[in-house]
Image: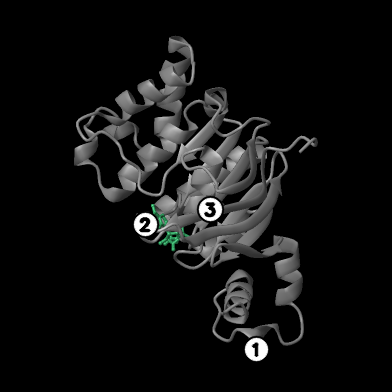
């Protein structure tokens, strides 16, 4: 992998053992090759169990692939240096219930090497941006699901990382919260950040991705850009290919997944 890019997978494969006493595995990610250029916003969509979270965990170095190569900001995912430049939001954020959002962000700022003065101002700024300043000093156990999700997003963003890796960033949010998160990610993208995320909310994905990948049964089975979707939406027969679809991405998604059945 000589060329510079923000994240790359080359022929990555990962399977999970069905039974700890047997060697055979059920594939979770199969033959995944994908490159994200700096500044790209890549959304992964796919049915439950398609391999989206496994892909994200492999990129973050939380699980090792069985085969293939992975690179994140020019380094191996296991390189601790890389994590100061990456913001990660897990599918189920685990915050410490007895700590406040501000305390979490102080911790995040410290482990990513921010100077205390710079961190103080940035923590207030990001808490305000995710609409949590009013609850910044309350313990996380008193937060609603949406507040916890926004606190976890602030944790991923506080050090102004170059690359954002987000597993279902709109999960558990009401329409206002979803709108806010889309706006925050659009702002990050406008400032040149690279974003890789997965989501089931196709309307949000369609709104701000530069490229969308569809995964099914562990494979990246299709890629599309918003421009291509618009073109398809205007094409003859587009409305009959997936009747009732709420958006061009949903129509494309249904077509791809239905056509990709075993
Ligand atoms: N720790 C694990 N042990 C065994 N199987 C696993 C494990 N994690 C994931 N899997 C399996 O791997 C496959 C891919 O799972 P993954 O969580 O990556 O899918 P996903 O696309 O993120 O799904 P969802 O949309 O439901 O979050 C599924 O069949 C899942 O059951």
Which residue is drawn at the image coordinates 58% and 63% (left, top)? 215
Q: Quadrant of the N terminus?
A: top right
**Rendered location of residue 44, percent (x, y):** 57, 57
Left or right position of 204 against 48:
right
Distance from mark 3 CB to nearest ligand 1 atom below 8 Å: no
Which residue is drawn at the image coordinates 62% and 51% (left, top)? 12
- Residue 217: in sight, yes or no? yes
**Color style of the picture:** one colour
Mark 2, residues whose alpha carbon is within 10 Å: few (<14), some, or many (≥20)? few
Quadrant containing ligand 1 reads bottom left
**Rendered location of residue 204, percent (x, y):** 54, 59
Q: Is residue 260 above or below residue 98?
A: below
Q: Quadrant of residue 7?
A: top right
Q: Which residue is mark 1?
A: 240
Counting residues from the N terminus, which is met first, the one under dot 3 or under dot 2? 3
Left or right position of 163 against 2:
left
Q: Is residue 121 above or below residue 90?
A: above
Spatial CA span between label 3 and label 1:
37 Å
Identify the element where label 1 is drawn: helix
* Viewer-nearest residue: 28 or 260: 28
* Viewer-nearest residue: 172 or 184: 172
Spatial CA span between label 3 and label 2:
34 Å
**Rendered location of residue 70, percent (x, y):** 63, 41
Mark 1, residues whose alpha carbon is within 10 Å: few (<14), some, or many (≥20)? few
Q: Which residue is mark 3?
A: 14
């Amino acid at each position: 992998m000589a060329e510079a890019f923000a994240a790359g997978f080359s022929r990555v494969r990962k399977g999970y053992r069905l039974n700890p006493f047997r060697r055979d595995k059920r594939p979770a990610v199969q033959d995944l090759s994908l490159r994200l250029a700096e500044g790209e916003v890549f959304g992964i969509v796919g049915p439950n169990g398609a391999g989206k979270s496994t892909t994200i965990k492999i990129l973050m170095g939380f699980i090792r692939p069985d085969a293939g190569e992975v690179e994140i900001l020019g380094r191996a995912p296991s390189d601790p240096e890389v994590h100061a430049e990456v913001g990660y939001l897990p599918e189920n954020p685990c915050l410490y219930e007895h700590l406040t959002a501000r305390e979490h962000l102080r911790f995040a700022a410290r482990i990513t090497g921010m100077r205390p003065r710079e961190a103080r101002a940035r923590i207030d700024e990001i808490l305000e941006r995710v609409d949590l300043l009013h609850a910044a000093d309350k313990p996380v156990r008193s937060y609603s699901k949406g507040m916890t999700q926004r606190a976890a997003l602030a944790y991923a963003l506080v050090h102004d990382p170059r690359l954002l890796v987000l597993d279902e960033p709109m999960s558990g949010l009401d329409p206002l919260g979803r709108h806010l998160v889309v706006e925050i990610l659009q702002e990050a993208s406008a400032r040149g950040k690279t974003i890789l995320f997965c989501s089931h909310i196709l309307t949000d994905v369609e709104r701000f991705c530069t490229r969308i990948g569809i995964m099914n049964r562990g494979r990246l089975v299709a890629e599309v850009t918003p421009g291509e979707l618009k073109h398809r939406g205007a094409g003859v027969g587009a409305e009959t290919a997936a009747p009732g679809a709420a958006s061009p991405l949903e129509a494309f998604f249904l077509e791809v997944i239905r056509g990709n059945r075993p």
